[in-house]
Amino acid sequence: MADDHPVVLAGVKALIQAAPEMELVGEAADGAAALKLILETTPDVVVMDISMPGLTGLELVQRIGGSGEPGPGMVKVLVLTVHEDRAYVQKVLSAGARGYLLKRSAAEELVRAIRAVHAGGLYVDPTIAGKFVNAEAGQTFTGEGLTLSEREEEVLKLAAQGHTNKEAAARLGLSIKTVESYKARAMDKLGLKTRAEIVRYGLTRDWLSEN
């Protein structure tokens, strides 16, 4: 876990250590130290703040999140922050983070969020998710009237939940190239161009509550 506030680190540490199936492998107080620690320990999940001195949380996510390749890219990132602006959520999810949790929700939601992210899902703080849905409720996506095939919807739903093409292929018993094709067709029909837009679309369809 990485945060430049000692009190936050102590609180998060206590919550993690209280979960019997979780093991804390290291702590860092800035982005550069966090990156070094991640490369050394290759944890399953990193819990980190966005605002840290030196290398910011967003820059760190961009370096390690969402590549789907062996090594540090397989590390799943859960952002723990005070920022409730939807723009922050879009940036970190688009960069490859698998979760976004508000610090004020940590006591009740942190362990649940870590479990969801570790299981391959995508976790968004319920308060933020509600803002996303409310803000986008009136949005019309390009081509929204077109019907997705069953496979296209399955693939897009898994993408919205944070699964990589490789993970989706394994779940659906398809090749990675086939999954990529279904995903591209679904995105083209709906006019979606980025991962953040897929997540936003999934939130309006209540897909993120499903694993």
Image (tube, rainbow, N blue to C red):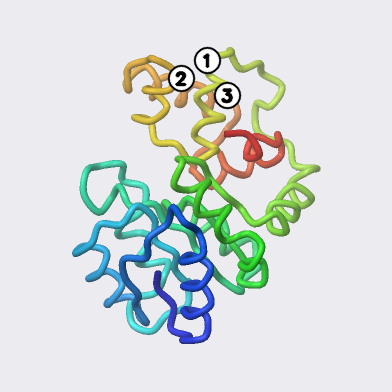
Residue at position x 61%, y 17% in the image: 148
Task: Give residue 19's position: percent from left, percent from top.
Answer: 50, 59
Q: Position of residue 153 (x, y in %)?
A: 58, 21
Viewer-proximal residue, 17 or 116? 17
The residue that mark 1 highlights is: 151
- Residue 137 vs 114, above or below: the answer is above
In the rendered image, which quarter is residue 131 located in? Answer: bottom right
Which quarter of the figure is the N terminus placed in?
A: bottom left
Other residues around mark 1 within 10 Å, as few (<14) / some (14–19) / many (≥20): some
- Left/right placement of residue 41 relative to residue 158 reads left
Q: CA distance from mark 2 to mark 3?
A: 11 Å
Residue 17 picture location, percent across and down: 46, 66
124 w.r.t. 184: above or below = below
* Disc 1 to disc 3, C-alpha distance: 14 Å
Query: Is 160 situated left or right of 183 in this image?
Result: right
51 vs 3, nearest the viewer: 3
Residue drawn at (39%, 74%) of the image: 56
Residue 64: x and y in percent read: 31, 57
User: Could you tell me the amino acid type at mark 1?
Assistant: Arg
Label 1 secondary element: helix
* SS label for mark 3: helix
Where is mark 3, residue-wise?
Answer: 189
Q: Which dot, 1 or 3, sits closer to the camera?
A: 1
Q: Which numbered marker is on residue 18?
A: none
Amino acid identity at mark 3: Lys
Question: Quarter holding the C terminus?
Answer: top right
Dot 2 or dot 1: first in sequence order is 1
Give the mark nearer the N terminus: 1 vs 3. 1
| Left or right: 119 in relation to 29 | right
Numbered mark located on residue 182 in the image: 2
How crowded is the residue under tag 3: few (<14 C-alpha within 10 Å), some, or many (20+)?
some
